[in-house]
Image: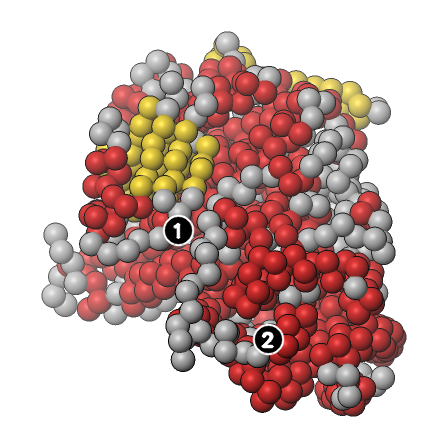
Amino acid sequence: MSTVFIALQANEDTRPIIDAIVLDNPECTVNRQPAMVKIDAQGKLTVRRETIEEQLGRPFDLQELQVNLITLSGNVDEDEDSLTLCWNS
Amino acid sequence: MQIDLRTVSIEPLRQTFDHLARRFGNKPASRYQEGSYDIQATENLHYRPTWDPDQLIYDASITRIVMQDWYALKDPRQFYYNNYTLARARQQETTEANFTFVETRGLADAIPDDLRQTVLDLLVPLRHAAWGANMNNTLVCGYGYAAIFTQACMFHAMDNLGIAQYLSRIGLLLGDVEALEAGKTDWLESEVWQPLRRYVEDTLVIRDPFELYVAQNVALDGLLYPLVYEQLIDGDLSPRGASAVAMLTQFMRDWYEETRKWIDAVIKTAAAESPANRAVLEEWTTHWTQRAADALLPIVRQANAEQAETMLAEEVTALKARLKKTGIEI
Amino acid sequence: MDMKVAKKKLALKEKYKLLTRDLGWEPSYQKKDDIYPYIKYEGIKIHDWDKWEDPFRLTMDSYWKYQAEKERKFYAIIDAHAQNNGHLNITDARYLSALKIFLQAISPGEYAAGKGFARTGREFPGVGTQVACQMQSIDEIRHAQTQIHALSNYNKFYNGFHAFADARDRMWYCTLPRSFFDDAMSSGPFEFMIAIGFSFEYVLTNLLFVPFMSGAAYNGDMATVTFGFSAQSDEARHMTLGLECIKFMLEQDPDNLPIVQNWIDKWFWRGFRLLGVVGTMMDYMLPKRVMSWREAFEIYGIENGGALFNDLARYGIRPPRGWDDAGKALDHMSHQFMLALYQYNFGTAFHTDIPTEEDMAWLDKKYPTTFNKYYRPRWEHIRKLKEAGTPYKNMGLAKLCQTCQIPTVFTEPDDPTQLTIREVDYKGDKYHFCSEGCQHIFENEPEKYIQAVLPMPQLFQAPLSGDLVAWMNWVGLQNGKDNGDYFGSEDQKNFDAWRDLATRNV
Ligand SMILES: [Fe+2]
Ligand SMILES: [Fe+2]
Ligand SMILES: [Zn+2]
């Protein structure tokens, strides 16, 4: 199973997003590096809008992720409710 | 250790990069200058393109326009990515507010049915023409010479796409998906739209970037925007009850006002370079303006049968006057 | 006025389709082949452009909105950085060499990529593909500009930045990234997508912008971190586009497989060689280091690249041809490249140094099987020569690899004591290569690579005829300021003096 990941800038905006990702992907690993947080998961990682909204306390458009996104890995599938990263092998 | 670095007063060793000092002297350069001048590779190009071995990777000679220095084609708006994007972000915010205003107050539904149909018939097929403009400006960016000119073409291409998308949203708002389908059928089949579609397809095979720039931005859009948004929507449809549409198309109007200054500056500089350039530009503008006028007439006529000829004649005259100020006589 | 019920809300995917690919049509006044003239000659067969999956569904309004937010943040930080002498926050001015290389070698590539994506954004017949490429085009213009703007303030206070535009076209080591981008630009649209979308974006930018930028953060350089991370957020879209494009080609026709595989092979090796530059930046130019180039390559090259190739295996793709050789080169490449840069450092517009004892201890820890065995002795020898007042300079003409244009300084994959020198005779001329990988690339397209402009021979031809001073003027190199060792340089003296001012009451 290959690793997928998403890396976000480490700042106030991303704290609740990272919390939400961890809630939705309890198996993931969070690596904190200078100015950056990288979240690894085996095979698949899902970012859900609803969970982010709960953490954030306001509506959130998943495309807002773009603003603080650093990088990602895996095939991307995005709609209004979730963004999924996965490797098919 | 926290150091208060602001208190340190030190003399810079130099004010700017060498290539900018050569152009403007040793003084601090603007961000526009830093981001635009001389950033395209010019020398020691390694390989001939496999897609056309007669060209160089960056080749100023693929157009008939000849410039001593292509970086003379300055953008009076001084747009580089940052101020371009910020300007458009502000405009999209206004546009979004306008759409929300029209949507939440049901203003679209307040437009009389026949008028709404006129608006849909006029605007929806234009989204395809805007896509053609997007393709053409993308080509000018891709194959044109010098960042100062080509970056503005890429911004323009993205604007063309934005306009195509706003026109689509107007279609969706006033007539749902069916309106887009009907508009596409018109674009492909209706007699009214065929001359314009032919015009667009004919420009899609032009490979001289500067001729394409003229055919698209000077001739076609130089007539289309004032005719559609000023003459027809503001002057005719809006007073008849479609003022909501004027709100939804504010972006296009503002955009045209802003961008024509850049287009005029480009043409003026290219024409002033040499009599040969001027002659080529006159040849192109004459040819494409005539064709654009012919292509637009049935479309204007469909929206306003009585005044179409007058409206078109006015705009052709206005375009000629505009070109005259850039040194081009047609 | 009565409030009407809102129209049924279209799903994002559906709406995006209507707002992009539905804008195009089947032309009838002009032939499709004339509108898209470059789409067939590479041999890639596409049957249905509608099968293209849009990776990110950004319409222009959202694009403007989110990008503007990134831009506001970015310029706020670099404005503050310039106003507050943020450059004095860096660990020490040795670090600037990495930034100088960045500006001379990488930023022009960003611009070239922007130009190239404008071309593919016009040449591909599918509207979804066009739009994705066009957004990437304008993004890449952004990257070139944000990098120049972030480094502009450094240029005012330090040497080596001022002639980056001249260096791009004339400097011998800049020809390495230049030939990479020129190679991509002179390829057809599909190959360009593999070259930039896959090789540059997927493998390279992650290494360039993620661990390297963490390194910048670690070294107190907030201006660079900001442009790096801000750019990489666009790169995430670009990588996804590259991957989408590979999958699309492979799904459209089984005949595309060998062509795509060949490009993956070529561009993996091209990219790996280009990465050598990043390797030296990470291993030798950061005063404080987050991770070695090897460690970074393990994560972003081997693990992430490996995941990609496993994923693509279902289409019949195998890992690139040079994959094993790259693995073997990992423990050597940055050291060999750095030694070469150092011995030619009279001709580099950045400073290099003999690593300190502390640096060497770190390098040994990170490269336990190779550094002490092969490279420490060389550095110590070079240090001895320097201390004896007879510094080691290679003023000779290096043999350059005809493909990647790096001096032939690398060793055989299985024998680190054996310098690799491959030669090919082609039409009566002799060509040299740094590796089997580069030779293979040449042999596939000799007519292309014999056109390469090699900068070293240029120095010895008219009009320069070996005149080093004339050469330095021509490339914009200020002798004694831009080049040579860091220790004792004007950059070092200035930085130390300014820092001193900042820490004392004068
Ligand atoms: Fe980039
Ligand atoms: Fe990119
Ligand atoms: Zn090579």
Q: Position of residue B242 (x, y in %)?
A: 56, 81
The residue shown at (16%, 63%) is B4
Q: Are marks 1 and 2 in contact (CB under 8 Å)?
A: no
Q: CA distance from mark 1 to mark 2?
A: 36 Å
Q: Which mark is residue C365?
A: none
The residue shown at (21%, 63%) is B5
Q: Amino acid at mark 1?
A: Gln
Chain letter of mark 2 equals B
Q: Which residue is mark 2?
A: B113
Q: Nearer the viewer, residue C365 or B158?
A: B158
Q: Quadrant of residue C146?
A: bottom left
**In the rendered view of the protein, which quadrant contains the C terminus of chain C?**
bottom left
Q: Which residue is mark 1?
A: A63
Q: Residues within 10 Å of mark 2 (few under 14, many from 20)?
A: few
Q: Nearer the viewer, residue C26 or C210?
A: C26
Chain letter of mark 1 equals A
Q: Nearer the viewer, residue B177 or A88?
A: B177
Q: Position of residue C100 (x, y in %)?
A: 44, 49
Dot 1 beta carbon under 8 Å from ligand 2: no
The residue shown at (41%, 65%) is C5
